[in-house]
Amino acid sequence: MQKLKNNWLKFCGEVLILVALFTVVQYAITAGLLNQYYQINLTSMVINIILAVSLNLINGFTGQLSLGHAGFMAVGAYSAVIMTEMLMQPFAIGLLAACLAAAIAGFIIGVPTLRLKGDYLAIATLAFGEIIRVVLQNIDYVNGPAGVVGISKLTTWPLLFGAMILTILVVVNLINSSYGRAIVSVREDEVAAELMGINTTRYKVIAFVIGAMFAGLAGALYAHFFYIIKPETFNFLKSFDILVMVVLGGLGSTTGAIIAAMFITVLTAALQSFPAIRMILYALILIIVMIYRPQGLMGTKELSRETFGRIWGGRK
Amino acid sequence: MSLMEIKHLNKSFGGLSAVLDFDFHLDRKELVGLIGPNGAGKTTVFNLITGVYKPDSGSIMFNDKSIAGLAPYTICARGIARTFQNIRLFNNLSVLDNVKIAAHKDVPYGFLSTILRTPGFFKGEAQIEQDALRFLEIFKLDNKKNELAKNLPYGEQRRLEIARAMATKPTLLILDEPAAGMNPQETKELMELIKSIREDFDLTILLIEHDMSLVMGVCERIYVLDYGQIIAEGLPEEIRNNKEVIEAYLGEEVE
């Protein structure tokens, strides 16, 4: 009973920290302390966190190397824009449509490709991501390669923050459950999992669909902040960007994905002052991290209540 | 009463017959051994029963229902669990999680209550944990529940594999060389363990083993497989003195 009460207190504490974080940023925005430049980077950071956490569910926890995450982001972005700009629906419906469309795309692509393993799956998902992009280039309704310009700026800090918390909460709650253990068992040993009664195909598809859904959400938020979307934005380089975050953070660590997404966003922003050598420095930093931390910044470890408890409590 | 009935089972890999016209039956609560020289097709038989391979032809009836060609997880749900010749644990997960995963097929809460963390979820998780700990206790692994499976010593990994298989609550347990790599003392303990879980859980057990002391010590009936075919079947004493079996293992007598 005491333990339950303690957990409840800790839970309240965590909610309080999140509320405080939210309020501070919200205040900074309304009071004009954060200029346009910082707001853009903050938005990129949150979107990157959503993308990295959702891709980590597929690549890190389920162990299925997917290289098509930008494709699902594109599906979400375009679905939301069609809803808000073309069909004049409220943003909420746009966001829902984005999640739904990306999840359906994830299902359609996941069912045939997840039979493949390793390199083959990587190539198949890469190809599907590119197919999505090329299809969008050829749809006149959304202006083909020129893309959609003049999207109203509907993405606000509360929405971004809410979407980020929702993504993290769903992934963390899923992973720390029997369903999550089934998902991780697929990564560990597919044959053994199957023989212990786990329908591995089912869990691969579930992880893939949930991952795709949040990529779609990120895409919708992206489109309604950055004014313009075109198919080229969601090419395979964008997929690799997300993959880099996941690998850098540590495959199978949600905290790692969050930290790496923040790190990469800050790094990209900081290197913008050196346009000539930007990509060289970026690559060098990644190489150095990979040499000294091949398992990623966090490995498969998580920062949790227990870790913080150990740090603050000194001993346990 | 018959639990499993296999008739005319065949499997070949690119022209090589691994299992040829295999006939076999298991009664409820029996403890049966499957022996034979290396490459005789013993593990292939296990893989066919558990659905890792699909048979080319023949029938496998379990509880009077055909399980031939079903997916492994369906066969597991019907009540067959197994261990592996070369240990296949979920290496980077804790000992406790390894056992919990085996209980997933009977997960007591739904997907939505997982995401929403309803009271049903916490109740279900507590129940899963309690069940898993019970199995770890039986296999004397409860003091290592938080260790990663890959960090366990070899003998304990073997035990954990059996614990994990038991956590799927099978009626038939299939053990693929459970004593491989164990010393005589460990083998003896394993024998006792196999006997005791069989009594406690009303299990039927089928095992492959090269350690003859274990096979002769626990098995009530033995099948001998050579080149994919059954060459002998009978009580341990009968097998021990069977001429064909001796030939299969040691070669023919010189005139």
Image (spheres, coloured by chain):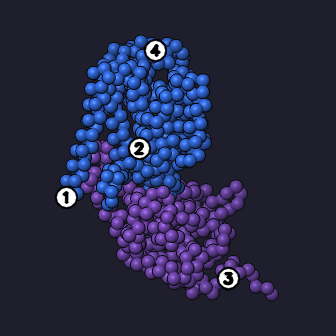
Q: Is mark 1 on a helix, strand or loop?
A: helix
Mark 4 residue type: Val
The span from disc 2 to disc 3 (Cα, nearest Å) is: 61 Å
Viewer-side label of 3, 1: 1
Depth check, mark 2 against mark 3: the one in front is: 2
Question: Quick one: label 4, few (<14), some, or many (20+) residues within 10 Å?
Answer: many
- Which label belongs to residue A148? 4
Q: Which amino acid does label 2 sit on?
A: Thr
Please rate how many residues cluster around mark 2, counting C-alpha atoms within 10 Å: few if below 14, some from 14 to 19, many from 20: many
Residue B248 vertical placement versus A225 (above, below): below
Q: How far apart are marks 3 and 1 (CA)?
A: 67 Å
Residue B166 placement, left or right of B244: left
Which quadrant, please, contains the C terminus of chain A? bottom left
N-term-proximal mark, 2 vs 1: 1
Quarter of the image for residue A4 reads bottom left
Between A161 and B182, the one lying in front of the other is A161
Observer-side mark, 4 or 3, equals 4
Q: Whole-percent x and y of residue B179?
A: 54, 75
The colour chain A appears in is blue
Q: Which mark is residue B246?
A: 3
Give the color of chain B as drawn: purple
Q: In which quarter of the image is residue A285?
A: top right
Mark drawn on residue A255? 2
Residue under label 1 = A2
